[in-house]
Image: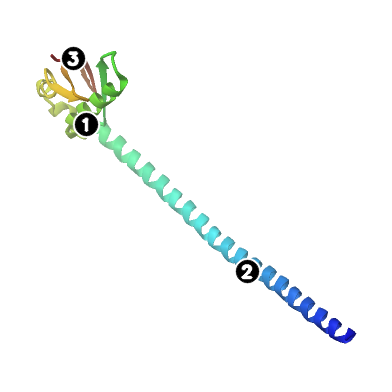
Amino acid sequence: MDSVKIAKFKFLLSVGVGICIGALWGTTSVTAFMSHRMDEYYEQIKRLESDIMERDTRLQKLEESINKQKYMIKDIQIELLYEEDDLDKIALEKHIKEKYMSLLGKEVKSMDMDLIQALVDKRIMKVHRIQYQLKVQKIIVTDILKLWIEVSIYE
């Protein structure tokens, strides 16, 4: 009977040791596989970052060469002369910028200031069930189109 207990113990011990060795081997192989894939992804990220930096540099040089020849509108800035609700102010700025988005990339020399002003001057815009009347106060056109617009509640 004693020999049966010893054989049972040896069997359980060998099964337990086999499970532990298998778990360690499996964990080691999965870790090695995952670290290899992570290294590949890291290399790919570095390669893509390098490509982006190269293209940004090329784009910057192209923009500089274009800028030496002509002034183009690159950005639109809206200054609202309105001190009421900030949410309405943000919505008005968004709607006004949408009106002027077609001017991005256009040459400054070919622009008509009267048309730029007439685009939103004396317009009525409805935001959150409130109607606002817009009046263009000042326009500055360089590579940035900058507008100062007075906003009043329309009744």
Three-letter amino acid code at disc 1?
Lys
| Mark 3, secondary structure of its residue | strand
What residue is rendered at 60% in x and 66% in y? 30
Could you give the CA–CA distance between mark 2 and mark 1, rounded to whole angstroms?
A: 61 Å
Q: Residue at x 82, y 79 (%)?
A: 9
Give the numbered dot on residue 70: 1
Q: Look at discs 2 and 1 and give the one toward the viewer.
A: 2
Residue reaching furthest right?
Answer: 2
Q: Is residue 110 above or below residue 48?
A: above
Residue 144 in view, yes or no = no
Task: Name, please, the residue furthest toward the front.
Answer: 1
- Which of the two residues, 60 or 119, is positioned nearer the viewer here? 119
Q: Earlier in the sequence, mark 3 or mark 1?
A: 1
The kind of secondary structure element at disc 1 is loop
Disc 1 crowd rating (10 Å Cα; few below 14, some 14-19, many 20+) is: some
Residue 142 circle label: none
Mark 2 or mark 1, earlier in chain: 2
Q: Is residue 140 above or below residue 2?
A: above
Q: Nearer the viewer, mark 3 or mark 1?
A: 3
Q: Assess disc 2: are there few (<14), some (14-19) or many (≥20) residues with their C-alpha within 10 Å of its C-alpha.
A: few
Q: Which residue is mark 2?
A: 29
x and y, in percent, of residue 44 in the image: 47, 56
Residue 114 place in picture, x, y as percent: 10, 20
**Foreground label between 2 and 3:** 3
Q: Could you give the CA–CA distance between mark 3 and mark 1, rounded to whole angstroms?
A: 40 Å
Q: Which residue is mark 3?
A: 153
Q: Quadrant of residue 59?
A: top left
Q: Position of residue 1 (x, y in %)?
A: 88, 86
Element assignment for label 2: helix
Residue type, mark 3 in image: Ile
